[in-house]
Amino acid sequence: VYTILLAIIAVLTLALAVLIIFLFISYKPNQQAAGVTPTTNPAMSERVVADDEMLEFKLFEGKEKMFALKEETEHPDSIVMVSVTIKCDAGPKKKKEQDITTRVNGYISEMEEAVGDYFAAMTLTEAKELETRYKARDDLLNTFNDILNANKKEKEKVVYRVTLQMFPQ
């Protein structure tokens, strides 16, 4: 009787261990956080935005910009060429198009500076990793929304997509 109970406990313990390992392997925080308000600013309002209610803005006048990366011993003079496009919420039926255009154009130099600061802290090895590109998109999206809401009492998610082309060299 005790042997059977001990065997049942051992099987259940092994099943629990396998379940825990599976959860740790399959959990991807970037996919879990997709579509959720950034945790850095939980008071920011957000809505589901249709593609025809989005405005597109290109940073750096639509050109690729070259940034120096953080120095590594193996790659002392590494650079990255970056092209950034953002898509912003213009409101239902694009009612806020003028306001968003004015706000983005007013803060475009700060957003461009934020891109430069972001890549200045990155090494060439990091820049070559695919996961870094996804993290950069998420980080820059949050940074751009923080910049665009800096002087607003009521925070709202303005930037919904960041398209990032990176060419590390």
Image (spheres, helix red, strand yellow):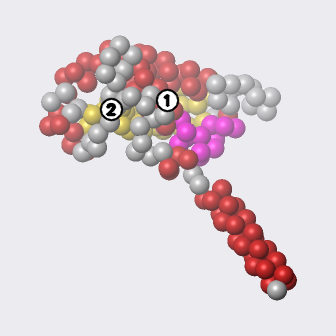
Residue 163 appears in the picture as rendered:
yes
The numbered mark at residue 71 is none
Q: Give the side of residue 87 with respect to residue 3, left or right.
A: left
Front residue of 69 and 145: 145
Which tag, 2 or 1, sits closer to the chain's start?
1
Front residue of 50 and 126: 50
Q: CA distance from mark 2 to mark 1?
A: 13 Å
Q: State which quadrant residue 96 falls in.
A: top left
Q: Position of residue 45 (x, y in %)?
A: 33, 32
Residue 144 appears in the picture as rendered:
no
What residue span does the magenta drawing correspond to?
A: 125-137
User: Mainly helix, strand or loop, the magenta region?
Assistant: helix
Instruction: Say which residue appears at 64% left-offset and 29% top-offset.
Output: 122
The numbered mark at residue 45 is 2
Quarter that holds the N terminus: bottom right
Q: Position of residue 53 (x, y in %)?
A: 21, 39
Front residue of 45 and 125: 45
Sort mark 2 into few (<14), some (14-19) or many (20+) by Cα contacts within 10 Å: few
Quarter that holds the C terminus: top right
